[in-house]
Image (cartoon, grey):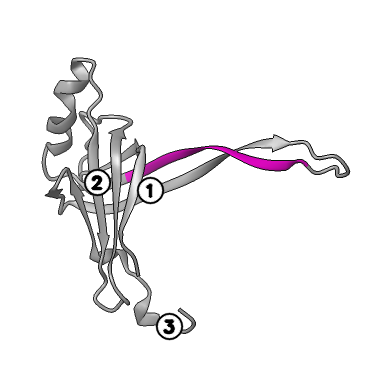
Amino acid sequence: MDNYTANQVLNGTWGEMWLNGDLMAETTALQAKVTLTKTAVNVCGTLVAGQKVTGMELKGTLKMNKVSSAMIKANSANIKLGRTPEFTIISNLDDPQSAGAERIVLKNVMFDELTLVDWEAKKNGEESIPFTFMDWDLLDLI
């Protein structure tokens, strides 16, 4: 896209997140990143080592307003039994002034922690939940 207007910049207010097919309206932010793992490669004739990609790290963070015990229900029983629950997350960012919607699915999502209690007087409840994932698919791109 050579030229764009300020109105086409995507605004996260229009983001949506589904967890195993259920819309999680309490979501306030979602981030997923692919970080490349590199190994130094010595190259003759230069003092600078080259880099070879030897792996990937797939991590993210889900932020939600605390309105229910949904995350505790989805994870607690399995964790106590020594099982690692896996989930599918679908992110949809569809700003009405953008050039389209961006939908991405994250596969084999595993949450890194489960917060059982976290509250403070005069503070709205929120959850920030780090996770890893094993794969992703691009469903719709702008």
The residue beneath circle 2 is 89
Amino acid type at circle 2 is Ile
Amino acid type at circle 3 is Tyr
Q: Earlier in the sequence, mark 3 or mark 1?
A: 3
* 24 on left or right of 32: left
Q: Earlier in the sequence, mark 1 or mark 2?
A: 1
Sort mark 2 into few (<14), some (14-19) or many (20+) by Cα contacts within 10 Å.
many
Kindly state the secondary structure of the residue where label 1 is placed. Answer: strand
Residue positioned 86% across, 44% down in the render: 46
Residue positioned 25% across, 68% down in the render: 94
Sort mark 3 into few (<14), some (14-19) or many (20+) by Cα contacts within 10 Å.
few
On-image quarter of the N terminus? bottom left
Say whether marks 1 and 2 touch (CB < 8 Å). Answer: yes
Kindly state the secondary structure of the residue where label 3 is placed. Answer: loop
The residue beneath circle 3 is 4
Kindly state the secondary structure of the residue where label 2 is placed. Answer: strand
Residue positioned 28% across, 47% down in the render: 63
Residue positioned 29% across, 33% down in the render: 111
In the rendered image, residue 60 lying in the magenta stretch gets the answer yes
Which circle marks residue 127 in the picture?
none
Amino acid type at circle 1 is Ala
Region of the chain picked out in magenta, as a range: 49-61
Residue 113, image x, y percentages:
30, 29
Distance from disc 1 to disc 2, alpha carbons, whole Å, reads: 10 Å
Residue 124, image x, y percentages:
20, 48
Q: Quadrant of residue 128?
A: top left
Q: Earlier in the sequence, mark 3 or mark 2?
A: 3
How many numbered discs, if any?
Answer: 3
Q: Main secondary structure of the magenta part?
A: strand
Residue 22, image x, y percentages:
12, 48
The residue beneath circle 1 is 32
